[in-house]
């Protein structure tokens, strides 16, 4: 919820599913990964509701619970600050509303309140409500927090219990943020109930504000995060812990916030030129048909069986969907049962909005059917190439630790240029086969499983540590599956010694999203000459072929053959962008010249933004796009952007000049564009600014390359 206290709701639109990040990347093999999820479909429901306009009084997810044979729904609206309780026997005949009251809620900072989730405790019948709040800051703008309220009279009176999630108390704005940027707080949460696992999970948004624009521009750095609380402890407001690094380890009150899945691109406030752009807070529930938890946008769906490790699958597109439906605040419900926390194979996905194209009323829904058949892909979409490949570089936050954070790829001149760097100068992955520990920072080559399989672990060559140079203690090596050790070297590998031949027969089973970490730790008080050569290999026998992943294949940036690059205006010589672990964007070092979401890039005044695909094999490819190419704006700028495609630096489309797309406009990429490629050929998809301004030049172009 975003409430503009200066009058009027903030203007937003939903991102299309093409803007969704690859939540967890699939197998990076030439044929592309096979989908692990049935291909769902969706059908747009009516624009308003038979016999009732109850959802016209909410700008938040409705909260539906069942008591006996009666369905109750709680709705909340920001402008009037009213909470309503409705009742009926089905979702479609809700009526007989009564105003709900709030008791004991804080009043000192001009708070506004939205009820986003309700859960009834078995046995006691107590209603627990998760509350999104917005409150005034000293500078006149607002931030957000998440609280808990309870009701003992079927939702008519809500009593304040306390705060459960607050902003990171040691918040530091990412590098490159305007001076004085401050946290936007936490909010827009969605509740998932994992009854079998014994936990509640809250997925919530975080970000920061530009100190100049404040409420007129939300941060372009906005991420989805997770926290959990044991179901048995729901009445204890301090039970919540936040996901950070690779575990739920930070306190809900003031602890660090860690992005899950990378959900960058699903919720995204503002483009780099400052235009308030769009929002999509996904829906979460459990599917009894799939036996999986699901996350959903308008025309995509992702699943997991493992909320403990946040191992989400690559999203599957919904066919026949509502990519032009701009409703906000998505929430699911199974009309057969009235449940929002558990749905069958066919259910409804509701959204709320006013006055937006495709969602002209306050609410509408799509019916989602997950009973389709799996479908394989032989294409590469740029949106799948936003994050790293199956291999990524991480570091443990302490020697021998099990909490891991992503390393940052360094392109700036200096000792770590073109290396992955952790929290210390020497804690690095510095080549395709070499990594180096720090003093209190272990270096890890981490592989993420794209499939379910039994894999054999090995090493392409022995593990070696160079000459002593005054240090003989060497390093220790270990392998973790997620955060549990599954193998370790029997002794330290000494500097300049014989090395270690990796033993045969080391196997483990993995599910999609499992992480295998190949970790190097220093020994003793010195890390001199601890550079370790270890080209780990992982082999999966799929029954049809052996697929081998080598750590050396994962040193460069990109997943699924894609790279984020940049060049001078009109140039043909590309340079690599750097992936920022703080902003979760690919950055060129030039103002606003970025690839900032799975489908979006933005040119600079002196810099073209480029998505480059590297051919993994020879053949003829067909070039297309997942949906129309759109440009933000106009916000005072109408010149738009110029598009072109290069093959190894030579333009292949259009035949000459550029394809212009004006601000606020769209362009349908033509069919029948083909090119022959050899292994290693590079197709570069270039976005260049037109005219003298780059305002609102954020370009949504999800390129697709098919063999």
Image (spheres, grey):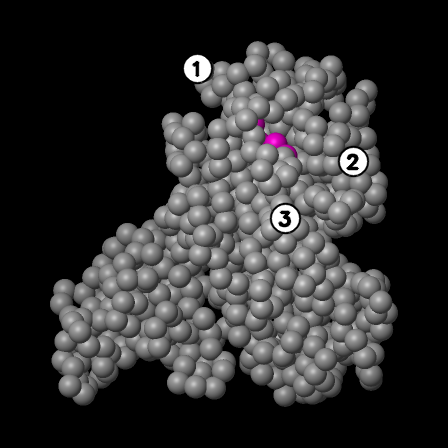
The residue that disc 3 covers is 142
Give the image location of residue 116, x and y in percent: 60, 34
Look at the picture and state if 461 lies above or below 384.
below
Q: CA distance from mark 3 to mark 2?
A: 24 Å
Is label 3 in contact with label 2 (beta carbons under 8 Å)? no
Pair 3/2: label in front: 3
The residue that disc 1 covers is 123
Look at the picture and state if 117 lies above or below 531.
above
Q: Which quadrant is the N terminus positioned in? A: top right
Secondary element at image label 2 = loop
Give the image location of residue 454, x and y in percent: 35, 53
Q: CA distance from mark 2 to mark 1?
A: 36 Å
**Nearest the camera: 85 or 566?**
85
Q: Residue at x 85, y 73 (%)?
A: 639
Residue 690 appears in the figure = yes
**Where are the magenta residues, as a range?**
114-119
User: Who comes first in sequence, dot 2 or dot 1?
Assistant: 1
Q: Residue at x 67, y 36 (%)?
A: 60
Q: Which quadrant is the C terminus positioned in? A: bottom right
Pair 3/1: label in front: 3
The residue that disc 2 covers is 362
């Amino acid at each position: 919820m975003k409430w503009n206290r200066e009058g009027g709701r903030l203007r937003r639109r939903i991102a299309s599913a093409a803007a969704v990040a690859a939540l967890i990347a699939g197998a990076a093999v030439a044929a592309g990964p096979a989908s692990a999820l049935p291909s769902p479909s969706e059908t747009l429901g009516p624009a308003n509701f038979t016999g009732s306009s109850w959802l016209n009084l909410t700008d938040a997810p409705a909260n539906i619970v069942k008591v006996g044979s009666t369905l109750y729904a709680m709705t909340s609206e920001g402008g009037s600050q009213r909470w309503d309780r409705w009742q009926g026997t089905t979702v479609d005949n809700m009526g007989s509303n009564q105003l709900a009251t709030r008791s004991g809620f804080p009043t000192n900072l001009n708070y506004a309140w939205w009820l986003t989730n309700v859960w009834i405790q078995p046995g006691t019948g107590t209603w627990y409500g998760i509350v999104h709040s917005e409150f005034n800051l000293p500078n006149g703008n607002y931030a957000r927090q998440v609280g808990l309220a309870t009701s003992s009279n079927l939702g008519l009176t809500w009593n304040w219990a306390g705060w459960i999630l607050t902003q990171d108390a040691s918040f530091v704005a990412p590098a490159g943020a305007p001076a004085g940027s401050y946290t936007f707080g936490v909010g827009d949460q969605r509740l998932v109930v994992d009854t079998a696992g014994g936990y509640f999970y809250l997925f919530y948004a975080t970000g920061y504000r530009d100190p100049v624009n404040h409420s007129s521009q939300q941060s372009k750095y906005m991420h989805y995060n997770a926290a959990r609380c044991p179901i048995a402890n729901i009445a204890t407001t301090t039970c919540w812990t936040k996901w950070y690094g690779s575990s739920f380890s930070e306190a809900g009150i003031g602890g660090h916030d860690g992005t899950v899945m990378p959900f960058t691109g699903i919720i995204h406030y503002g483009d780099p030129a400052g235009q308030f752009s769009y929002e999509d807070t996904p829906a979460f529930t459990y599917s009894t048909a799939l036996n999986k938890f699901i996350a959903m946008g308008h025309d995509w769906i992702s699943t997991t069986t493992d909320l403990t490790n946040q191992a989400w699958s690559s999203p599957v597109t919904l066919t026949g969907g509502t990519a032009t439906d701009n409703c906000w605040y998505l929430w699911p419900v199974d009309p057969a049962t009235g449940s929002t926390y558990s749905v069958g194979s066919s259910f409804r996905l509701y959204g709320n909005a006013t006055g937006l194209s495709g969602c002209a009323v306050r609410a509408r829904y799509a019916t989602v059917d997950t009973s389709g058949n799996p479908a394989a892909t032989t294409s590469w979409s740029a949106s799948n190439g936003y994050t790293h490949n199956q291999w990524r570089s991480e570091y443990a936050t302490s020697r021998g630790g099990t909490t891991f954070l992503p390393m940052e790829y360094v392109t700036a001149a200096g000792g770590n240029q073109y290396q992955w760097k952790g929290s210390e100068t020497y804690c690095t992955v510095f080549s395709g086969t070499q990594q180096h520990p720090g003093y209190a920072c272990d270096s890890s080559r981490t592989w993420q499983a794209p499939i379910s399989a039994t894999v054999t672990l090995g090493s392409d060559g022995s593990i070696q540590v160079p000459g002593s140079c005054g240090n003989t203690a060497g390093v220790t090596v270990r392998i973790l599956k997620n955060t549990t050790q599954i193998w370790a070297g029997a002794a330290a590998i000494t500097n300049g010694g014989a090395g270690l031949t990796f033993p045969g027969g080391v196997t483990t089973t993995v599910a999609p999203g499992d992480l295998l970490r190949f970790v190097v730790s220093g020994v003793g008080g010195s890390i001199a000459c601890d550079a370790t050569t270890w080209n780990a290999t992982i082999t999966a026998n799929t029954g049809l072929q052996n697929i081998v992943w080598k750590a050396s294949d994962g040193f460069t940036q990109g997943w699924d053959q894609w790279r984020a690059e940049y060049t001078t205006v009109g140039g043909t010589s590309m340079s690599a962008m750097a992936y920022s672990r703080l902003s979760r964007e690919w950055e060129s070092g030039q103002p606003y010249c970025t690839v900032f979401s799975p489908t979006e890039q933005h040119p600079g005044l002196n810099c073209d933004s480029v998505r480059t695909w590297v051919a993994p094999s020879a053949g003829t490819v067909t070039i297309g796009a997942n949906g129309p190419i759109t440009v933000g704006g106009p916000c005072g700028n109408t010149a738009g952007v110029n598009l072109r495609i290069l093959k190894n630096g030579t333009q292949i489309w259009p035949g000459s000049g550029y394809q212009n797309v004006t601000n606020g406009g769209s362009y349908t990429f033509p069919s029948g564009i083909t090119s022959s490629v050899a292994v290693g050929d590079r197709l570069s998809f270039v976005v260049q600014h037109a005219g003298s301004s780059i305002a609102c030049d954020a370009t949504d172009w999800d390129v697709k390359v098919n063999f």
